[in-house]
């Protein structure tokens, strides 16, 4: 029994050494790029695979009300990218339900016929970005690597991986790939009171604590920052009326509908575009 245990231990050690020197198993067959405009990178059995997404949100840029400035800035950057001109990685931050994710979806619908493609990547797939770059770098399409609702805790491995990819690694993103990320946090990581208390004043200058500088350094690597803000009551009602029209109800917003929309927002504790869309679906369904 002792010899058998020793043999098994040596066999396991040998397999570990072989695993280190053997090449990684090949990824699944190359996706049919013409089959869809959007894809999702997923981890399966320790390696990444690209999945085709067929059923996409059919939201358009005119559907996004109350964020005209944000739409203009991100669409301009995306248009530059699709046309092969220099463009920046984009960080969209701010209040929940204000159209950050919907803007990326609408841009895909707007520019898909001009060669734009979107690859959705979760935090667990950020370390695989070099593999994604290798997969798409020879393609004629223009790819947005889309990270939705991105935020990190202090010890998550995706944080240094994304930081290196954006601006720090010896290898750069290919010319046909940009990163668009959405987050409710401006600097993508939690900020604590004690970190701000460690800020020093030298004369009239402010010197942030090293921990604060470290957290800012990630968001700073996105070339374009776009902030989204909570909607006013009038903006919320305008969005609700737009979606009521989209769901088939015509005419102006009468008093009963207006009060119902406000009560809906009060019950949800938010006057966001998402809440307005949800109200419109409910109200149109009843009517």
Image (cartoon, rainbow, N blue to C red):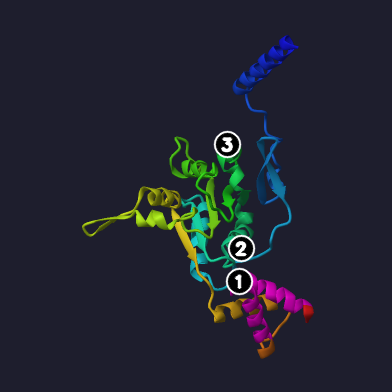
Residue mark closest to the camera, 3 vs 2:
2
In contact (CB < 8 Å): disc 2 and disc 1: yes
Quarter of the C terminus within the rendering = bottom right
| Above or below: residue 19 compared with residue 78 | above
- Residue 172 shown left or right of residue 263 in the figure: left
Q: Residue at x 42, y 58 (%)?
A: 193
Residue at the far bottom in the pictured view: 255
Q: Position of residue 239 (x, y in %)?
A: 61, 76
CA distance separating discs 2 and 1: 10 Å
State yes or no: residue 281 in magenta. yes
Residue toward you, 45 or 208: 208
Q: Position of residue 104 (x, y in %)?
A: 59, 59
Quarter of the N terminus within the rendering = top right
What SS does tag 2 mark? helix
Q: Which residue is mark 3?
A: 134
Q: Which residue is mark 2?
A: 102
| Above or below: residue 277 compared with residue 48 | below
In magenta, the rendered stretch is 257-285
| Above or below: residue 136 compared with residue 253 | above
State yes or no: residue 265 in magenta. yes
Residue mark closest to the camera, 3 vs 1:
1
What SS does tag 3 mark? helix
Question: Who comes first in sequence, dot 3 or dot 2?
Answer: 2
Residue toward you, 111 or 22: 22
Residue at the far top in the pictured view: 3
Quarter assignment of residue 250? bottom right
């Amino acid at each position: 029994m002792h010899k058998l245990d020793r043999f098994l231990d040596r066999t396991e050690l040998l397999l570990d050494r072989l695993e280190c020197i053997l090449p990684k198993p090949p990824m699944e067959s190359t996706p049919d790029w013409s089959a869809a405009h959007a894809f999702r990178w997923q981890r399966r059995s320790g390696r990444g695979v690209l999945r085709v997404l067929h059923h996409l949100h059919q939201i358009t840029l005119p559907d996004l009300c109350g964020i005209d400035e944000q739409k203009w800035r991100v669409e301009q950057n995306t248009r530059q990218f699709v046309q092969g001109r220099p463009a920046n990685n984009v960080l969209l931050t701010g209040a929940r339900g204000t159209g950050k994710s919907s803007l990326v979806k609408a841009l895909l619908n707007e520019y898909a016929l001009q060669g734009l493609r979107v690859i959705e990547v979760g935090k667990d797939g950020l370390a695989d970005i070099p593999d994604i770059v290798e997969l798409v770098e020879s393609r004629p399409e223009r790819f947005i690597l889309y990270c939705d609702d991105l935020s990190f805790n202090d010890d998550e491995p995706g944080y240094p991986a994304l930081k290196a990819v954006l601006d720090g690694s010896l290898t750069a993103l290919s010319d046909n790939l940009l990163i668009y990320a959405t987050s409710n946090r401006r600097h993508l990581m939690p900020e604590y009171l004690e970190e701000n208390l460690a800020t020093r004043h030298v004369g009239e200058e402010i010197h942030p604590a090293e921990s604060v500088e470290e957290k800012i350094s990630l968001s700073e690597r996105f070339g374009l920052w776009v902030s989204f803000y909570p909607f006013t009551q009038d903006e919320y009602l305008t969005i609700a009326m737009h979606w009521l029209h989209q769901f088939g109800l015509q005419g102006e917003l009468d008093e009963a509908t207006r009060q119902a929309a406000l009560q809906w927002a009060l019950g949800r504790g938010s006057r966001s575009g998402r809440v307005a869309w949800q109200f419109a679906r409910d109200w149109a369904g009843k009517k």
